[in-house]
Image (cartoon, rainbow, N blue to C red):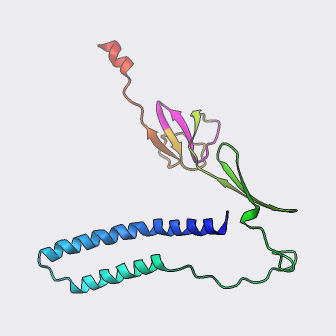
Amino acid sequence: MQPDALAELIVLTVAKAIAPLRADLARVEGELVALRDRGVALDRLDESVTAVRERLAGLEARPPVPGPRGTDGLDGLNGKDGADGLGFDDLTASFDGERTLVLRWTRGDQVKSLPVELPIPRYQGAYASARSYRPGDVVSYDGSAWHCEVLTSSRPGDGSRAWQLMVKHGRDLRAATVGS
C-alpha cells in the first residue's frame, strides 16, 4: 500500500469516527434553537456549543504532524547501515477462501507474515456435537439458524453466549394442515 493511499485511509477513518460527534452536535444545536424559540436564555450554553463546534472544526482541519525521528536500527535487529526495513512495497496478501487473510512482507531472505482470522459467516450444516465451532460459523439446529460468537463445542440454544439465534424456526404447517 502506498503512503498516500494509507494517509487517505486514515483521513477517512478519522472522518468516520467524528461523524457521530457531528450528528450529536447538530442535534444539540437543534434543541437549543427550540429552547430559544420558547424564550429560554442560553448564553453560557451557546458559548459551550460554539467552543465544541470550533474544536471539532479544528480537529478536522488539522494537518498531519510528523512524529519524532525514530531510533536508528541495530545491526541484526531492525536494519544494518541504515537499510530500510520491510514496507508497503514488500506486502502481499493471500486469502485461503474461508476465513484467513495472510499479510506477508518479503524482501530477499526477510519474510514476516501476519495471519488474520476474519469472522466471515460460513454455513457448517447441521449442528454436530462431536465438533467445535469458530466465530462466524453458522449451523442449523432444531429448525433454527445459529451464529457462533466464540470458539465452542456447546449446543446452540443451551443458554450460553457462544451462539446467537439468527433465524427462529416457524410454525409447522404440515401438522396444522393434516389436522384441519
The residue range painted magenta reads 130-145
**In the image: residue 99, left or right of residue 149:** right
Q: Residue at x 20, y 73 (%)?
A: 33
**In the image: residue 155, left or right of residue 23:** right
Q: What percent of the width, then of the height, locates residue 29?
A: 27, 73
Q: What percent of the width, then of the height, locates residue 37?
A: 13, 74
Q: Is residue 169 above or below residue 33?
A: above
Q: Quadrant of residue 26?
A: bottom left
Q: Quadrant of residue 93?
A: bottom right
Q: Nearer the viewer, residue 4 or 156?
A: 4
Q: Residue at x 77, y 68 (%)?
A: 86
**In the image: residue 24, left or right of residue 67:** left
Q: Quadrant of residue 54?
A: bottom left
Q: Residue at x 80, y 61 (%)?
A: 106
**Residue 137 among magenta residues:** yes
Q: Is residue 168 above or below residue 31?
A: above
> Which quadrant is home to the C terminus?
top left
Q: Is residue 173 above or below residue 121?
A: above
**In the image: residue 115, left or right of residue 31:** right
Q: Nearer the viewer, residue 144 or 101?
A: 101
**Residue 106 among magenta residues:** no
Q: Residue furthest left?
A: 39
